[in-house]
Amino acid sequence: MGEARTSVAALRWLDGLELLDQRLLPGRVRWVGVPGAAAAGRAIRNLTVRGAPAIGLAAAYALASEARANPELSQLRRAARLLASARPTGADLARAVGHVLRVIEQAPREDRFERALEAARALHQADVAACLAMGEHGARLFEMGEVSLLTHCNAGALATGGIGTALGIVRVLHAQGRLARLYACEARPVLQGARLTAWEAVQDEIPCTLLADGAAASLLASGAVQGVVVGADRIAADGSVANKVGTYALALAAARHRVPLVVAAPTTTFDMACPTGASIPIEQRSADEVRTLRRHRTAPEGVEVYNPAFDVTPADLVTAIVSERGVARPVTPETVRSIAT
Amino acid sequence: MGEARTSVAALRWLDGLELLDQRLLPGRVRWVGVPGAAAAGRAIRNLTVRGAPAIGLAAAYALASEARANPELSQLRRAARLLASARPTGADLARAVGHVLRVIEQAPREDRFERALEAARALHQADVAACLAMGEHGARLFEMGEVSLLTHCNAGALATGGIGTALGIVRVLHAQGRLARLYACEARPVLQGARLTAWEAVQDEIPCTLLADGAAASLLASGAVQGVVVGADRIAADGSVANKVGTYALALAAARHRVPLVVAAPTTTFDMACPTGASIPIEQRSADEVRTLRRHRTAPEGVEVYNPAFDVTPADLVTAIVSERGVARPVTPETVRSIAT
């Protein structure tokens, strides 16, 4: 029985931050250098890097880059604000940036870069460990021998610093020889499921079946899967979960067919200052994500578009939430608090 | 207050059957001639024409074409079998072909073509009238002044011989000045919502907002729509509805948010020989519909695909079924039977 591992990474620090350009997957593997906060902000907004934990780590490293280029505090505070506001829904981003900025503020001017880089590396290592811990906690929820799981979007190595959140569970089960098959919703409009999750699965030889988002309810009705595993972008104090748009529909279908829905997210994704899902800001993205597919027009001009990047699944539809600290099950404000920090 | 009408058509008989090639929409409007049953079978399978009622009409006209080319009964029976088996889920196809074949069998050899063409034209006219009647029955279900409706796939003029089934309701409300907005799910993988419904809406100046299928549950949660209207490919005796994959997920979200789900289909779509949804054959289509978008690869090679074209929504989630004969509400075997013929 092997260790859960992956050959896939979203970001790395060589002599500076480099991101795997996720916009080009699955067709091309290209690493791009990200010189500072402005470039990192663009890369986060344009989805070169995505996934709440990975975004947080990219921004942390980018702030360290800024500290090397210019250790002035006023400039670094400006860079931190720019990075923290690049995308609104994920909780990890502002937290990671705030953490590195505090380290910088407490360091002597000449040490700011090194301390910031140390802090970013520590966040990265913590995320690697958190993914492994979530994978193990989550895998123990599926005690029925071999299982097939359904996931949405990409909550994998490409979304984190480690083996992934939801895909961490998948990888642990796979390493234990207990994964029959991973079913992956494609996740329109940006197709992170088709382009990223399916690609990760092929890289790591995980048996994977892709489906259109609309086919998930009939898959759940068929009895083919024993669990739905997803990540999260922000988890409110009541256990409501903001995640990639489409998660809520999966949750409704899973509940109808009594298939457990397990949400996996590191403590950095929990936001105890959000009392309920209603207080989570939901990013609206460009109409052209829906009207086109990779520059190919799929809809007539003149049609308007509703394109929220995320939706909120209320806690009553979530069977369990897993963080590196353990499992909240049933999902209540008390159990959520117990695994949130 | 105008009459509900449309500038859009899926098929026409000039000196032979012509189909609007729906694979090219919304980019190009091209009519293609369909010389006989073999060409019509291909056009049905490759989605040049789609939508259960439109497929039935196309096949009826194609059988008339065959009768002109060769009035031999054995040959016409073979053509009818070929046409009836072109796609398995929609109920209208076998019924329309069977009807025209019976007319042919009862006609003198020299009149077979003309009688068959008359029969196809009569089916077409009946569908025009059925769409109008469904639109009026359905519009009366929304008695709360101005409403916004959500639809899935394309149940419009492009799917029928008239103003559409679900879009018939939309067009009647629009003609009455009571439609605030039509929301259209794009309907991956083939994007009939984005390519066809949004195009029909633009042609007929119906205000329309497009969304990814996964965004529908959050739209319903937001309170923006007062009804979900869809068509059907086959309706079983218990009121279960086979329709474009993704309909079931919409039904679950509509039920959660107490938004009525109205299914509109002509009597030709009802199949009283199917006791429940479990007996409806569900077509599985090619993996490349999901792995590609218009020849652009969206997923890695080596990934498997689950691609059912339809799903089944159980009767308990359907608020009302509308045929040209009236409204089944609540949906029970008795009310369904009362509007099925």
Image (spheres, coloured by chain):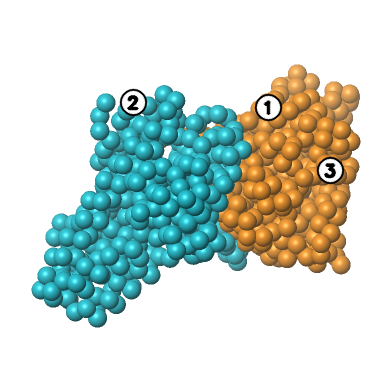
Chain colours: A orange, B cyan
Q: Are marks 2 and 1 on the same chain?
A: no
Q: Report which quarter residue B295 is drawn in.
A: bottom left
Query: Mark 1 and mark 3: span between their CA atoms?
Result: 22 Å
Question: Could you tell me residue A313's position as x and y percent?
Answer: 68, 38
> Residue sitting at 83 percent across and 32 percent down?
A333
> Residue sitting at 86 percent across and 50 percent down?
A137
Q: Nearer the viewer, residue B222 or B323?
A: B323
In the rendered structure, which amino acid carries the disc numbered 1?
Ala
Q: Is residue B259 above or below residue B51?
A: above
Q: Nearer the viewer, residue A125 or B308?
A: B308
Q: Is residue B127 above or below residue A104?
A: below
| Residue named by callout 2 | B177
Q: Nearer the viewer, residue B62 or A292?
A: B62
Q: Are marks 2 and 3 on the same chain?
A: no
In the rendered structure, which amino acid carries the disc numbered 3?
Arg
Q: Nearer the viewer, residue B95 or A224?
A: B95
| Residue named by callout 3 | A329
Q: Is residue A144 visible?
A: yes
Chain to which mark 1 belongs: A
Question: Could you tell me residue A146's position as x and y percent?
Answer: 78, 65
Residue A135 is left or right of residue A242, and the answer is right
Residue B73 is left or right of residue A263, and the answer is left
In the rendered structure, which amino acid carries the disc numbered 2?
Gly
